[in-house]
Image (cartoon, grey):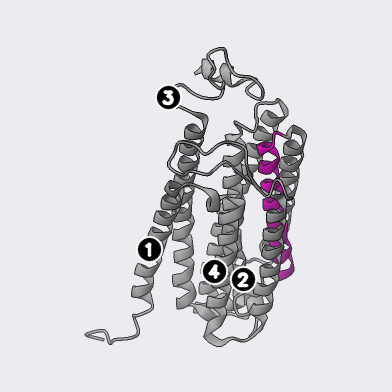
Amino acid sequence: MSDSSERRIHSRSDLGGSANDHVVSPAVYVTVFAALVLLTGLTVFASTVNLGMWNTPVAVVIAVVKAALVVLFFMHVKYSSRLVWLALGGGMLWLLLIIAGAAADYLSRGWVGTPGS
Amino acid sequence: MSSVADSARGSGTGRSETGRHPALVHHFESLPAQKEAATLGMWVFLVTEVMFFGGLFLAYTVYRNLHFHAFVQSSRHLNLALGAVNTAVLICSSLTMAMGVHASALGRRRGTVAWLLLTVALGSVFLGIKAIEYKDKFDHHLVPGERFDAEELHLEGDEARQAQIFYALYFAMTGLHATHMVVGIPIILTVAGLAHRRRFSPEYHTPVELTGLYWHFVDIVWIFLFPLLYLIGRHH
């Protein structure tokens, strides 16, 4: 644990701060795993409690936190180059755009009257 | 091409006479540069996968808002216990995959192979449980089509048809997810075979890392599928 917690096996590469050669400690992986299991239990529990309109947002937020843990630690993005961050961030942006665009249509349909009906 | 494959052979240990690492192909200056390019390529692929699944999640969101009651009734017929166990199994397999990548980064050949095989075993358990769940849906006529029967869901008329939309999305999303696992398992087995034949080293183990990225992505998709499909309206 002490010597290998975040030890590098190569010197810093010549890629402008890329640090994708980090070796992450198994203790970090086990901690992330435990958090993921706890959050799974939490989302199951939260679904049994009546939170009104907040049940779905809570479930989605827990899922986003779990996904972030997997991406940052299991997938090493925390230790990856800015280029990887950019590719991932660009993808997330487009995913949000497609969902927000469609939601703006479907969720607002009842707000104003439809002419001729 | 064959020269690349030849030079990659035995890359676990030595360098070639020219001082270049055998796994380093000629158009890259250094192994870290080559690895960075490969990692970026994998991430771009995974982003296309996010958009692929994103369309299905979008369709789910729209229809769930339009037909909420039918979705709640349909969701409650899914087996929560099996879904939760499968979530745990998949998270375990992500841990074993991370440990496999870790072992390969330290050059531990046997550890790499063992963790990768354990990952395959857990992935197979997931698919087995999924098969049990699918069979149950077939037995209860909950597969969209002519013989779909919404009586057990206590739905009729329009809502019975809306329940078919839920199950169509259920099979499309979990089916596409399971397909990714069916694809992933032989990839992991191949990489485990390469690791067993000493193709990797602390300097060069990019295939193990990229396979890990793919497997973790499959885990993330399930992290969203589980609450959205299994946990709607459990409190009603």
Residue beneath the point at 67% across and 29% down: B194
Tell me: B157 left or right of A110. right
Residue annotated with mark 2: B149
SS at mark 4 in the image = helix
Task: Tell me how far mark 3 sits from mark 2, CA to CA.
Answer: 60 Å
Q: Nearer the viewer, mark 3 or mark 1?
A: 3
- What is the three-letter code of the residue carrying label 3? His
Q: Chain of mark 1?
A: A
Residue beneath the point at 66% across and 76% down: B152
**Residues drawn in magenta:** B80-107
User: Looking at the rendered structure, which numbered label has been put on residue B166?
Assistant: 4
User: Looking at the rendered structure, which numbered label has been put on residue B27?
Assistant: 3
When the figure is inspected, residue B14 is found, relative to residue B75, above or below; the finding is above
The 10 Å Cα crowd at callout 3, few under 14, some 14 to 19, many 20 or more, is few
Residue beneath the point at 29% across and 86% down: A112
- What is the three-letter code of the residue carrying label 4? Phe
Q: The C terminus of chain B lies in which quarter of the figure?
A: bottom right
State whether residue B215 appears in this view.
yes
Q: Earlier in the sequence, mark 4 or mark 3?
A: 3
Tell me: A64 left or right of B142. left
User: Looking at the rendered structure, which numbered label has been put on residue A98?
Assistant: 1
Q: Which of the 4 quarters of the picture holds residue B13?
A: top right
Q: Nearer the viewer, mark 3 or mark 2?
A: 3
Whether callout 4 and callout 1 share a subunit is answered: no
- What is the three-letter code of the residue carrying label 2? Asp
State whether residue B174 appears in this view.
no
Q: Position of residue B63 (x, y in %)?
A: 46, 72
Task: Tell me how far mark 4 sits from mark 2, CA to CA.
Answer: 13 Å
Whether callout 2 and callout 1 share a subunit is answered: no
SS at mark 3 in the image = loop
Q: Which of the 4 quarters of the picture holds residue B85?
A: bottom right
